[in-house]
Image (cartoon, helix red, strand yellow):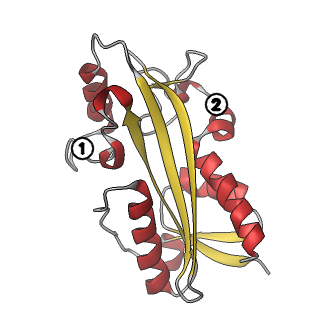
């Protein structure tokens, strides 16, 4: 019988990736458990937001929870948008508007270095367990949006090979994504802890 863990998301893409990597566990979504909670991401670090979500949901559902927080940190902009990646133009802005804004911000700039960061946190409030894993992918901000096989800022993060994350196949992206790196790290910790 597989151990059940709730993933603090209803994003099917994220769920699929988590289920593929954490095969030894039964990964449930919030929707699977009839949970309609929106935890406010008001911390100033990815670790803080990820931990807050995992703690609140683990406490509420009385089961282990994995939560993630991720974002884009642009060197020229002192790490902006960072933890504000999903909402730096307000809740109503589209992803296209956010991506265009960042491309325009870097117009004429030589330093286009950017890091995609994902932090995954496992919390089991009832057992007092907490595991934190981080994954990073380095690249550059493209001069234009390219590719249509992704979501978020995939179409503007360009890798060393000149392709954006959105120009990779799903399989290629999953092999190198910051979420994959963080998940593999978390998987090792879960195996060591035997949780």
Q: Nearer the viewer, residue 186 or 146?
A: 186
Q: Which of marks 1 and 2 is in front?
A: 1
Does any portion of residue 28 appear in the rendered image?
yes
Instruction: Quadrant for the C terminus, please.
Output: bottom right
Return the residue at label 2: 169
Does label 1 or label 2 sit earlier along the sequence?
1
**Which element carries disc 1, helix, strand or loop?**
loop
Residue shown at the point (36%, 74%) measured from the top left:
37
Residue 170 percent coordinates (x, y): 63, 36
Return the residue at label 1: 88
Residue 95 percent coordinates (x, y): 33, 37
When asked about the image quadrant of residue 161, the answer is top right
Q: Distance between the residues labelled 1 and 2?
A: 28 Å
Is 177 displayed left or right of 112 in the figure? right
Q: For residue 101, which numbered disc appears in the image?
A: none
Q: Nearer the viewer, residue 59 or 115?
A: 115
Residue 79, relative to residue 102: is it above or below? below
Residue shown at the point (55%, 53%) measured from the top left:
14
Is 21 displayed left or right of 136 in the figure? right
Residue 121, relative to residue 161: is it above or below? below
When asked about the image quadrant of residue 109, the answer is top left
Q: Crowding at label 2, few (<14), some or many (≥20) Cα neighbours within 10 Å?
A: few
Count of all numbered marks drawn on residues in the image = 2
Does any portion of residue 22 appear in the rendered image?
no
**Which element carries disc 2, helix, strand or loop?**
loop
Residue 179 percent coordinates (x, y): 57, 48
Is 148 displayed left or right of 102 in the figure? right
Residue shown at the point (51%, 55%) measured from the top left:
119
Residue shown at the point (24%, 43%) measured from the top left:
88
């Amino acid at each position: 019988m597989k151990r059940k863990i709730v993933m603090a998301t209803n994003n099917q893409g994220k769920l699929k990736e988590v289920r593929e990597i954490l095969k030894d566990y039964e990964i449930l979504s919030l929707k699977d458990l009839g949970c309609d909670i929106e935890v406010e991401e008001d911390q100033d670090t990815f670790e803080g937001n990820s931990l807050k979500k995992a703690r609140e949901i683990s406490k509420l559902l009385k089961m282990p929870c994995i939560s993630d927080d991720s974002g884009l940190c642009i060197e020229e902009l002192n790490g902006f948008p960072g933890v504000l990646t999903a909402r730096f133009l307000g809740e109503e802005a589209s992803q296209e508007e956010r991506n265009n804004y960042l491309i325009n911000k870097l117009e004429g700039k030589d330093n286009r270095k950017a890091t995609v960061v994902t932090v995954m946190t496992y919390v089991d409030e009832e057992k007092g367990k907490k595991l934190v894993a981080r994954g990073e992918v380095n690249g550059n901000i493209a001069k234009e949006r390219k590719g249509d096989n992704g979501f978020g800022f995939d179409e503007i993060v360009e890798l060393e090979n000149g392709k954006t994350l959105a120009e990779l196949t799903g399989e290629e992206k999953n092999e190198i994504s910051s979420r994959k790196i963080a998940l593999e790290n978390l998987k090792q910790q879960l195996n060591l802890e035997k949780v």
